[in-house]
Amino acid sequence: MKKELLKPIINAIFALFLIILVKIVAVVMLKEVRGVNTLIDIALSLAVVIVLLTFMQEFNKQLEISSPEFPQLRQIVSWLIFLLVVLTIYGAFSPFSGDLPYGIYFIIFFILALLPIYFLWKILYKNTDKISSFIESFSFEEKTRCSCGMENPESAKFCNSCGLPMQEKK
């Protein structure tokens, strides 16, 4: 993974760790106070949403710098984060789902969850070749260069571009 992408990831991990610590402290210290746990859970869930949205903004900014040739990657990250936000809000307000008639709470969040899933599918389907080459770029397999100039995996017997036999290493 590229170095500049680690900073937003580490920031998000630290923020989520602090939110978990607040939850633990709240459970231990406020266990006798009735009704406050639901409010704390909602507040912490909203804090998680803020962390996720901040992470999305920072990570996409770094992706724009590190991978300008693949702008769809930022869309993938955005839709994944949006899906996590929908699921977080769904869990936060689920204690109040009984207040709405006919299961409308579940239907609304089901539709909200389908939106990012649909757009993720659409992006992934259109960009399968770019995604596979992007994933390959993180490969640790050694590369060898053919006489035509094409890089090939070390295990390749023939060049993926011109078809010439690869020279064996001695």
Image (cartoon, grey):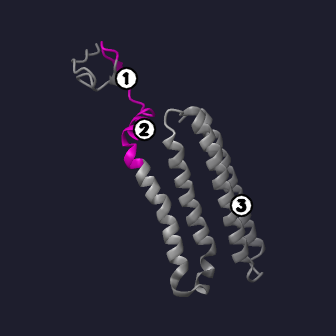
Residue 89 pos. (x, y %): 61, 68
Q: Which residues are magenta?
A: 124-149
- Indicate which label's residue lies in the foreground, 2 or 3: 2
Q: Dot 3: within a 10 Å radius of its alpha carbon, few (fewer than 14), some, or many (20 or more) residues? A: few
* Residue at mark 2 to residue at mark 3: CA–CA distance: 35 Å
Amino acid type of disc 1? Lys
Separation (CA) of disc 1 from disc 2? 15 Å
Q: Quadrant of residue 129?
A: top left
**Number of the label disc, if any, that sits on residue 135:** 2
Which residue is at 75% across, 66% downward?
25
Instruction: Classify 40 as above or below 18.
Output: below
In terms of depth relative to the viewer, which is nearer, 35 or 159? 159
Q: Residue at x 40, y 43 (%)?
A: 127
Q: Name the front one of labels 1 and 2.
A: 2
What is the spatial separation of the Cα atoms under label 3 and label 1, in whole angstroms? 45 Å
Say left or right for 156 vs 8: left
Q: Earlier in the sequence, mark 2 or mark 3?
A: 3
Callout 3: SS: helix
Q: Which mark is residue 143?
A: 1
Q: What's under tag 3, amino acid-wise?
A: Leu
